[in-house]
Image (cartoon, rainbow, N blue to C red):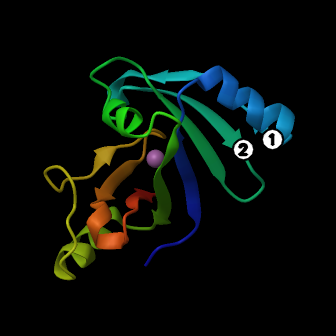
Amino acid sequence: MIGKLNHVAIVVPDLEVAALSYSTVLGAEVSDPVDLPAHGVTTVFVSLPNSKIELLYPLNSSSPVQPFLDRNPGGGIHHICFEVEDIFYARDQLLKEGSTVLGDGEPKEGAHGKPVIFIHPKDFFGTLIELEQV
Ligand code: CO
């Protein structure tokens, strides 16, 4: 059902330092910071030949990633995102298998303007999984 790894999202305590680390130490191509008010985050996109890394920083104190940063002050991997062809099919399959789809279960517009759902970390060994229809 799942296809390519679309991105790995990492919450960081300092976006500027993190972007600089990826660009200078790792030699990666990084974007300028992009505010995503609908998601409560500022993001720097790191482009890789086969995927992306999204560096996330809370846009404000009510950001959904603020509690994660509180628990992990040094930063950490927040979620991984796989591509699917049909988000409703994927959602229904997951529910049938007993997985917990977060929120009201309806796909929402994700950071790339495409429909996404999130699956509870308890269902996949401690990792929050995002599925994005491409
Ligand atoms: Co994501």
| Front position in the image: 69 or 107 | 69
Provide the secondary structure element on which disc 1 rests.
loop
Give the x, y percent position of residue 128: 37, 58
Residue at image point 41% right, 34% down: 69
Q: Is residue 86 left or right of residue 19?
A: left
Picture quadrant of residue 88: bottom left
Residue 60 drawn above or below residue 125: above
- In the picture of the structure, the residue carrying the numbered disc 1 is 28
Residue reaching furthest top? 60
How many circles with numbers are drawn on the protein?
Answer: 2
Residue 94 drawn above or below residue 81: below
Residue at image point 58% right, 24% down: 14
Q: Is residue 15 left or right of residue 109?
A: right
- The kind of residue tagged 1 is Ala
- The kind of residue tagged 2 is Ser
The image quadrant where one finds the N terminus is bottom left
Give the x, y percent position of residue 25: 84, 37
Residue reaching furthest bottom? 97
Mark 1 Cα-neighbour bin, 10 Å: few <14, some 14–19, many ≥20: some
